[in-house]
Amino acid sequence: MRDLTLDMSSCLSVDGVRITRKGKSLLNVPHLALDGPGPTLILGPNGSGKSLLLRCLHGLIVSDRGQVRQDGVALNADHKARQAMVFQQPVLLRRSVAANLDFVLKRQGMPRSARKSRIEELLAEGGLDGKVRQSARSLSGGEAQRLAILRALALDPETLFLDEPTSALDPNATQMIERMILRASTRGVRIVMVTHDIGQARRLAADIVMMQGGHVVEHGAAKQVLDAPKSDAARRYLAGGLVT
Ligand SMILES: Nc1ncnc2c1ncn2[C@@H]1O[C@H](COP(=O)(O)OP(=O)(O)OP(=O)(O)O)[C@@H](O)[C@H]1O
């Protein structure tokens, strides 16, 4: 198990990051530091750069300029190995529910005897204990997303990135996933999550990153950003107005 005292002081930061494609600036973040306990929720209108920022933080996209840093050190393979990501559409293996988890645990070198009990523990955590042998491809949308999150948690990540994990789910399935996310956060996993759902941000976030036009227009404590936003862009987004 990871040392949580170390995790609480960890800082994921972005400095001078720019991504430009075909002469168009898609992401321009002079500085952003995620150094609180989180969860951090990234909010903003369509096309504002939320997913690009998340992918940059996870090292899936290399920026044209600037750096993502973990505790002041440029993001490297060791850092990335301690990160996991869950996408809007869960990507699962054509195997049983248990085999999807076993695959990840085996790759980490966990012995078979330990894997069995860890899989049971994970399935209980995600409310999938009755689905051990079911094909992952036959799960409902909510179940599949729960399995994708469990597979990410099986890596025992320091940081878990989630890109709109509940956008296609009903309120009940969403609530189950929000509970999993909050439990992981309580256990010390840094959560960084993209959402469009202001209610979800209110339920989950400790801090909020508000984006518009590839810029971070505001970053602060969730209550402050949601109840007393400083930027016009955030005010209009939260009021449901048209943000261009
Ligand atoms: N590989 C790419 N090449 C060119 N443009 C890209 C690329 N990836 C993203 N973009 C553009 O960058 C902008 C930001 O995209 P991004 O996916 O980060 O937005 P978003 O805020 O997550 O939007 P949504 O809420 O709709 O998912 C969009 O205009 C998108 O078309």
Image (spheres, rainbow, N blue to C red):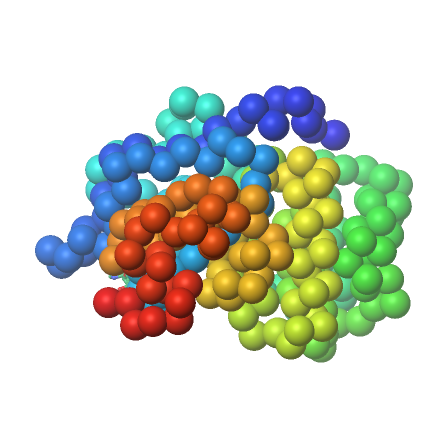
Q: Which quadrant would the N terminus be assigned to in this image?
A: top right
Q: Is residue 72 visible in this depiction of the protein?
A: yes
Q: Which quadrant would the C terminus be assigned to in this image?
A: bottom left
Residue 148: x and y, percent? Answer: 64, 59
| Rendered residue at 26%/37% (across/down) | 30
Ligand 1, seen in the image, is in the quarter at: bottom left
State which quadrant residue 43 falls in. bottom left
Nearer-the-camera pick, 94 or 50: 50
Residue positioned most to the front: 228
Residue 3: x and y, percent? Answer: 69, 24
From the viewer's perspective, tell me whether residue 16 is left or right of residue 170. Answer: left
Indicate whether 173 appears above or below 54: below
Residue positioned most to the left: 23
Residue 76: x and y, percent? Answer: 43, 30
| Rendered residue at 66%/73% (across/down) | 171
Residue 8: x and y, percent? Answer: 60, 27
State which quadrant residue 91 falls in. bottom right
